[in-house]
Image (cartoon, rainbow, N blue to C red):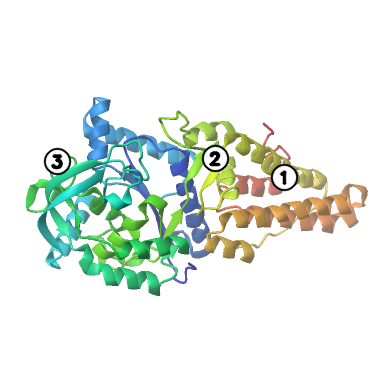
Amino acid sequence: MLNSENKFYITTAIDYVNDTIHIGHAFQKVIADVLARYYRIKLGKESVFFLTGTDEYGQKAEKATQVSGVSTKDFVDRIAKTDIEQQDSLNISYDRFIRTTDPDHTKSVQEIWNRVKASGDIYLGEYKGLYCTGCEAYYTEEDLIDGKCPYHPNIEVKIVSEKNYFFKWTKYKDFLIENIKNNPGFIFPLSRANEMLEFAKNIKDIPISRTNFKWGIPVPDDPEQVIYVWFDALTNYITGVGFPDNKELFNKFWPADVHILGKDNVRWHSLLWPAMLKSAGVKIPKTILVNGFLSLNGQKISKSLGNVIRPTDWVSKYGADAVRYYLMRYTAITEDSDISEEKLKAAYNSDLANGLGNLVSRVLKLCQGKEISLVFEKSAISDNVAKLIEEYKLNEALTAIWERIKEADVLVDKEQPWKLSEEKAKPILEKLLKDIYSIAYDLQPFLTETPEKIFEKIETKEIKPLFPRI
């Protein structure tokens, strides 16, 4: 969990391009962004790489295109563009936004295929079974709930019969089980690791090519088949850091320190991906961090319910920092959480406007007209906040920072510097300014604009509200 090396490589799940990302997807991106920004402060910008992107191949994308009436490439281009706009609205500081239609990714996937084949782990067979286009995943009857996919109950699970290439997943069963048992930090939280241990006991060889659609990366030496979307999509994590051509970049950042993903994708990342890498002779990632799902006003976020919220819907009203703050403060990232605009607005007014914003304005107003000149030397996140971030307790880190905001407010009320002479008030105001500076410094991973505004206000003593009440 704690990073002991002088580099940090974090990835998010890449999102299907059947539709533009919503606030639930953005939740994961903000978590990753907080971690990336934290490690940039700790290790330096050049020592951190943050990858996110879009998953653009597969039957799901091809079907969405048929409804849209445009070419598949035009459709995925359009969705990728809107996904970038949504992430940018929240100031997600990715180092690369990868698209699985990128030419270097095709080369990377085919290289992994050839390496796995060279290990004797690919064979031609016939698959007969169940397939969910929503997950782009194969299932057994035991996996289903009342005959439905547990993650896409509104999509019919289809019976598929195809001649495909298979990956010898079963060959790596013992390796996968031992990896989870011997590396307690490999899957976080631990409850997800226990689920995967049970699942690993029953893995079967898996089809890794498809023949009933064409929108995919061709199988080397067999262009009639395309590579299964999960075999393709997982490989983005090594493409993103230069595999196979940019060895310097790849050797600097691989293996990934954290893959962050939703609970519906754990089996592919913790069991299929390590097996693929082991077969290809590539190191496996260090940590699979599993985020919970968000619901909105007690309901699943879905187009059919008409309750899809895009990040820009909230950012346009409250600003990026307020949305980021709310998502990180009022959720436990590894658990399911319920969100609402009403709760966001309440957090904005109580915590940001009346809390942080009011403290800054209050203290700076008291400093006006006084000779106060300080040198701020803070160059690291406070130890308690750093520890909580590295333990993925982001909500607790923010709670700890807000306790300091409350303590500073209490100090103002107790000492009442406006009643004191300048000589007696000065050390109190100096302490308050240092406290505010330290608070702003520690907020840098979470809030992308506010800390810099606070630093500037301390310099200029400008008291315009940081967060006007809504």
Using the image as rendered, state which of residue 162 and residue 270 is in the foreground: 162
Specify the amino acid type for callout 1: Gly
Q: Residue at x 45, y 48 (%)?
A: 29
Specify the amino acid type for callout 3: Asn
Residue at label 3?
A: 212
- Circle 2 packing at 10 Å, graded few (<14), some (14-19), many (20+), is many
Q: Residue at x 44, y 41 (%)?
A: 87
Helix, strand or loop for disc 1: helix
Residue at label 1?
A: 355
Q: In this view, does 217 lie to the left or right of 397?
A: left
Percent of width and height locating residue 300: 47, 38
Percent of width and height locating residue 400: 67, 57
Q: Residues under labels 2 and 1: Cα distance?
A: 18 Å
Q: In this view, does 24 lie to the left or right of 436?
A: left
Name the N-terminal-most of marks 2 and 1. Answer: 2
Residue at label 2?
A: 320
Q: Is residue 331 left or right of residue 4?
A: right
Helix, strand or loop for disc 3: loop
In this picture, is 455 found above or below 376? above
